[in-house]
Image (cartoon, coloured by chain):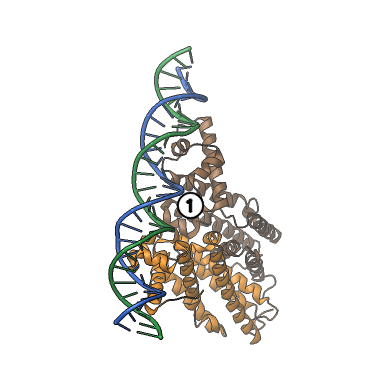
Chain colours: A orange, B brown, C blue, D green
Amino acid sequence: MTRALTRKGEATRARIVAGAAAEVRERGVDEVRLEDVMAHTGTSKGQLFHYFPDGKEGLLLAVAQHEADQVLIDQEPMLSNLTSWPAWLAWRDRLIERYLAQGVKCPLNGLLGQTGRRAPGAQAIVTGLMWRWQKAITEGIRHMQSTGDIDPDLDADRAAAALLAGIQGGVLLLLSTGKIDHLEAVLDLTIDSLRAGAPTGGS
Amino acid sequence: MTRALTRKGEATRARIVAGAAAEVRERGVDEVRLEDVMAHTGTSKGQLFHYFPDGKEGLLLAVAQHEADQVLIDQEPMLSNLTSWPAWLAWRDRLIERYLAQGVKCPLNGLLGQTGRRAPGAQAIVTGLMWRWQKAITEGIRHMQSTGDIDPDLDADRAAAALLAGIQGGVLLLLSTGKIDHLEAVLDLTIDSLRAGAPTGGS
DNA sequence: CGGTTTTTGGACTTGCAGGTCCATTTTTGC
DNA sequence: GCAAAAATGGACCTGCAAGTCCAAAAACCG
């Protein structure tokens, strides 16, 4: 665990991870060859195995963590601020925008389901990401409940789970069909549904 | 296109596809070697390339089609019969049951997103599956609208898109986390939401 | 400085899995 | 039954990509 990385070393390592991540986004996990990474980052095989002694697997794991973190970062500060309906819509817009821009190049498409089976570590990364994501949504719902904008009787965690699943599915369908419609529909209808349950306008 | 397959030939071909499908479910798409298929189906390399001249790619394509069809078949007759709330719940139960049993072994996990990029044909298979699936849901919603059980003003296609996305995400999360909670939450909450919008009990 | 450790480059090895080929056996259809 | 076509078995080829190794260069640190 004690790392002996000099400045330069750390920079190189970071460059490799970033380059590998780009390569994964571009070609997909299974299609990435170490040579691609080397070419893309201007490094040699010696370096790759110097910084990632476990070889490709270790590198991909680092990439996965890097990308997983990025997914949540990209949603900030909206995701941590779901305190009003306009804020929810702003988050919605950010999601749409982000995934529209990303298009087919999902950095985690290989991770979900498949890679989870590969490395036990990858499983943990995905699970962790989903866990954090859902937790943030739950907190948003709870806040809206505290302000009376959402029915306090609603199971916040369950609703967050459903919304998260919807988002994942929406992204998945974006990946396979190229259309963002599903993601949009999920976000709009689910948020509407949350609003509808509010004590304000209900039965 | 002119096939010259004898009885035996057809049987062997089917055996290969079925065996390969099992193998894909078991090990995942990328981890399947032709030798695995050969061992599992008691066939030789000559046979594989005899029935699938395009090699692995052609075989996997056949497997994909086979599995995609199965996904919808497994939901019958419920999926084509969403004509009452109990019927909807029966469908829900069937989905839960099916995916609970299937667990991590999703035959299409490699297809979604990733393989879609690989073969242009795989893309079409997934898109086709999603299209048919969504269409069936849409028809269910339309029927419920016709009987007054769902608000006629609801955009059935959009609602179906959202539900489909939710299901996909639920399955995805089942694959990565091993828990069926997300799928359950999506189904229950979405169906509830459809009911809530009904003219019967609404504002 | 100068010894030590880290970083870097790249040639080389290795194993594997997809794909080719052809000889042999079986089935078909008349 | 017999010729043609299809089915089968398996040896062989081939290319690729991960991983190994070591020697040279650069950075670190007292």
Of the 4 image quadrants, the one containing the C terminus of chain B is bottom right
B30 lies left or right of A128: left
Residue with the mark numbered 1: B125
D30 lies left or right of B94: left
Eyeballing the image, is A16 above or below D20? below
Name the amino acid type tagged 1.
Answer: Ile
The picture places residue A57, in percent across and down from the top left corner, at 48, 62
The picture places residue B119, in percent across and down from the top left corner, at 42, 52
Q: Residue at x 54, y 64 (%)?
A: B161
Eyeballing the image, is A18 above or below B89? below
Eyeballing the image, is A141 above or below B152? below
Q: Chain of mark 1?
A: B
**Does residue A128 show up?**
yes
Of the 4 image quadrants, the one containing the N terminus of chain B is top left
Circle 1 crowding by C-alpha within 10 Å: few under 14, some 14–19, many from 20: many
Front position in the image: A151 or B108: B108
